[in-house]
Amino acid sequence: MINFFINGENDVLFRIEKYEKLCWVDMINPTDDEVDDVVAATGIPEDMIKAALDEEERARTEFDDGCSMFVVDCPVIEESDAGDSYSTLPLGIIYNKNCIVTVCLKGNPVLKDFITGRVKISCDKPVGFILNFMYGNAKRFLYCLKQIDRKSHRVQAELGRTLKNEEILQLLDLENSLVYFSTSLSSNFKVHEKLSKAEAVATREDYRDLYDDMVIESNQAIEMCNIYKDILSVSMDAYGSVISNNANDAMKKLTVITILLAIPTMIAGFWGMNMPVPFQAFNGETSSVWFWLVIACTMVLTVAIAFILFRYMIAPTKRSRRQKRTRKK
């Protein structure tokens, strides 16, 4: 899809039907025919336009034959039945003396603010266009990071009540998103440094102020991303330890049950191989008293061993937990 925009009176942005000089060409997942049309109309190389259509394209700059290209990573929120997921997509801003071209696989919220007039931009001032976009993109990263932090708190609160695989997987997805954000923010920062060397940024005070604001927002996003990533990593390790401890407690209880069941099974096995019960025949008469006596001894032995196991294996664990709760209070 291709949209053309140009500034009218009072720099108001409005849409036009076809390409005109000093316009903004917004390309969203364009087809090959649309790319060819834009290349023919603007004189921008095809490889520059198609660079941002690669999901794995890294943030970078390129200058060739009077054309300048800035590729930056942008945060993307993808909605699904399982909840929102966060990732990044490259977006390319290319300009020459004739026009500005933006290329991305999906629509961008920052560019939508340009289109709706929330942010004033001039199509004949490409450096100002790029600065406004990068400033808005940095703020968009901050917004997504706050959303990730809130979602992380909700998931951790749920995990505090019940440890489920679903919540663990959600935390893992959030941790992966923070890794993507951290990498993208670092790559974008290198592009920002290249932009600072532009003559317009160095000579115009308003551009310099906007660039400084953009750098401040970017640095804040990088710091927040690193903090959230460290916190989430520590939380994942802690929940892993909790799950491991719960598994150990369950195995300990199952071991105790197995031992207790083994005692009557073992005794029954001794006397179940066609072996007579001791003193079953007394004075020539058959009696079941000794059978019940063996059963009673088996039960007493099982109870005694259960008491010992409970005292030295299970009780110390419960006692230590009570002590920890008392210390917290």
Image (tube, rainbow, N blue to C red):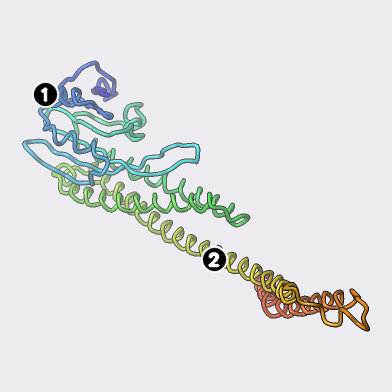
| Camera-nearest residue between 248 and 236 | 248
For badge 1, the amino acid type reads Ala
Instruction: Determine crowd level at label 2: few under 14, some 14-19, many 20+ residues with C-alpha closer than 10 A.
Output: few
Which residue is at the far top? 17
Placement of the N terminus among the 4 image quadrants: top left
Three-letter amino acid code of the residue under disc 2? Ser
Alpha-carbon neighbours of circle 1 within 10 Å: few (<14), some, or many (≥20)?
Answer: few
Instruction: Check the image and name the residue furthest to the front.
Output: 284
Residue, x 30% and y 49% (percent of image)? 184
Q: Where does label 1 land, which residue? A: 40
In the depicted structure, whether residue 108 falls above or below residue 220: above
Verify CB contact (< 8 Å) between mark 1 and mark 2.
no
Cα–Cα gap, marks 1 and 2:
62 Å
Q: Under tag 1, what secondary structure?
A: helix
- The circle on residue 236 is none
- Left or right relative to 228: residue 121: left
Reading the chain from its start, which is encountered first: label 1 or label 2?
1
> Which residue position holds label 2?
244
Secondary-structure class at tag 2: helix
Q: Residue 312: where, in percent of width, then height?
A: 69, 80
Task: Please report the residue visible at 63 percent of the width from the left and 55 percent of the height from the top.
Answer: 161
Residue 37 placed where, x, y %?
15, 22
